[in-house]
Amino acid sequence: MINYTEKIPNNVDLGRDRVLQRALEHWQPAYMSWWYDMGPNESHNYDVYLRTAVSVEPDGWAQFDYVKMPEYRWGIFLQPRDEKRQVNFGIHKGQPAWQEVPGEYRSILRRIIVTQGDTEPASVEQQKMLGMSCPSLYDLRNIFQVNVEEGRHLWAMVYLLHRYFGRDGREEAEALLARRSGDTDNPRILGAFNEPTPDWLAFYMFTFFTDRDGKFQLCALAESGFDPLSRTCRFMLTEEAHHMFVGETGVSRIIQRTCEVMKENNVEDPSDVRALGVIDLQTIQRYLSFHYSVTLDLYGSDVSSNAANYFTSGLKGRFRETKLDDDHVLSEAEYPVSEVTGDKIVTKKVPALTALNERLRDDYIDEIADGVGRWQRIIDNVGISFRLTLPHKGFHREIGNFTGHFISPEGEVLTEEAWRKHEFQWLPSAKDYAYVQSLMSGRVTEPGKFANWIAPPVRGINNQPLDFEYVRFN
Ligand SMILES: [Fe+2]
Ligand SMILES: [Fe+2]
């Protein structure tokens, strides 16, 4: 028997909700065995300096302490309810926000929640081995923080399934623990979540690009007319910000270290840079192009009747829906999408309702471009002439209008043969991965020490010094 309020911090009155308790009594042990099995390798006995959410108040995040990860208090939090909230878009616009699942939307709503929920444990599985090659205790602590929070995001979606979807919700909650990233028989639902995350450069790229997809999906769901989903996503977004911070600063620190070494030694050629034990900017660019293109696919087809349905039904809004100045119904509006015609990429206007995936992807691209601009400034400040670029939207895509086409990073339509000739100038090769992994053959565990290929961060976690013992091995 679980002591609920003690073990599972929550603001959903779990202590008095017998139905929810019974569902969790079955699910929680299954979750723990998933964590022991698929959580960070060999980590179960470490004491990790983690923050735990204990309430939704601003100071609810202030709890930092050493925790063994299997004893992390995965909680259930929803942003407090706004009694006046309405459905803010689609055909139900102006109705009070739904506190229960509307019967007609039950199955699509469940599908939306399951698809979001599935990404959370997937990323933990993808990152399982990385602790074995961490560049510092600071970074090790950060990946563990991300992992326990992705675990909590799974709890957040499972809460919705248990609380609002009865028996089929419980079955879906179990299935979320049964799928495995990259498994041929029972893979995770979305493509990018079945790709390996083989090294720390890939991890930082993943948290910059793919966790940011998470942010945009959560922002769209935070607009949902189904109020519990909206409130759950709003709280999850507070955690997502830290994941993207880990990604952006991780890549920044790698770029900074590479640039310092290039400048000190006056080298530019990638092989000379590699000889000095840091990651050449060309390889960083190839990782960037890979993670960007794979993540763009997560937004789905450019033209999608599902996306139109989700919006019209009031289930999934646009990025910052209530801040947008239009009718929030979109029956007349148009939106540009690209497609390949012959050997050209052309833009055409389609009904905006059907282009909502593309629109969310474009909002995401704007934010990504800002982040890449900040990385570029590091290179510029050191005085190295190298440009990091985002490849064309159609480059290396497997979903949507560019599927089956061979688009260069500059946006030219090529033959497959011409494209393949350049493939490993544009995307990481097996040799690139082998090189990056050769830098990460063991882990750096001395407090205050950092691997040669990455600069230290500007400051520690929670005002602790850089040489703080963020993880204690036992
Ligand atoms: Fe997440
Ligand atoms: Fe995340």
Image: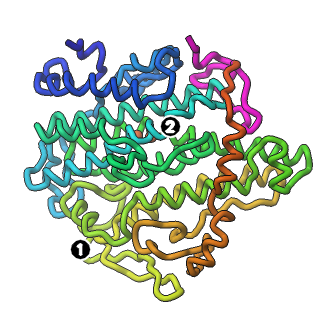
Q: Give the range drawn in magenta.
A: 447-474
Vertical comparison of 287 with 461: above or below? below
Which residue appears at 26% of the width and 77% of the height? 332
Q: Nearer the viewer, residue 19 or 188?
A: 188
- Quarter where residue 417 is shown: bottom right
Vertical comparison of 111 with 426: above or below? above
Answer with mark 2 or mark 1, whichever residue precedes in sequence: 2
Image quarter where the C terminus lies is top right
Which residue appears at 39% of the width and 16% of the height? 71
The answer to whether residue 300 of the structure is visible from this angle is: yes
Residue 385 drawn at (x, y percent): 81, 60
Element type where label 2 sits in the image: loop
Q: Nearer the viewer, residue 87 or 398?
A: 398
Which residue appears at 34% of the width and 79% of the height? 350
Vertical comparison of 58 with 384: above or below? above
Q: Which of 350 and 303 is in front in this view?
A: 303
Identify residue type, mark 1.
Answer: Ser
Q: Examine the structure image and report whether residue 396 is included in the region drawn in magenta.
A: no
> Badge 2: how crowded within 10 Å, few (<14), some, or many (20+)?
many
The answer to whether residue 81 of the structure is visible from this angle is: no
Is 23 on the left-hand or right-hand side of 133?
left
| Picture quarter with ligand 2 | top left
- Quarter where residue 467 is shown: top right
Q: Examine the structure image and report whether residue 450 is included in the region drawn in magenta.
A: yes
The residue indicated by pointer 2 is 127
Identify residue type, mark 2.
Answer: Gln
- Quarter where residue 316 is shown: bottom left
Which residue appears at 33% of the width and 51% of the height? 189
Instruction: Kindly identify which numbered label has been placed on residue 331.
Output: 1
- Give the residue at the far left of this rendering: 103
Say which of marks 2 and 1 sits in front.
2
Residue 166 drawn at (x, y percent): 11, 37
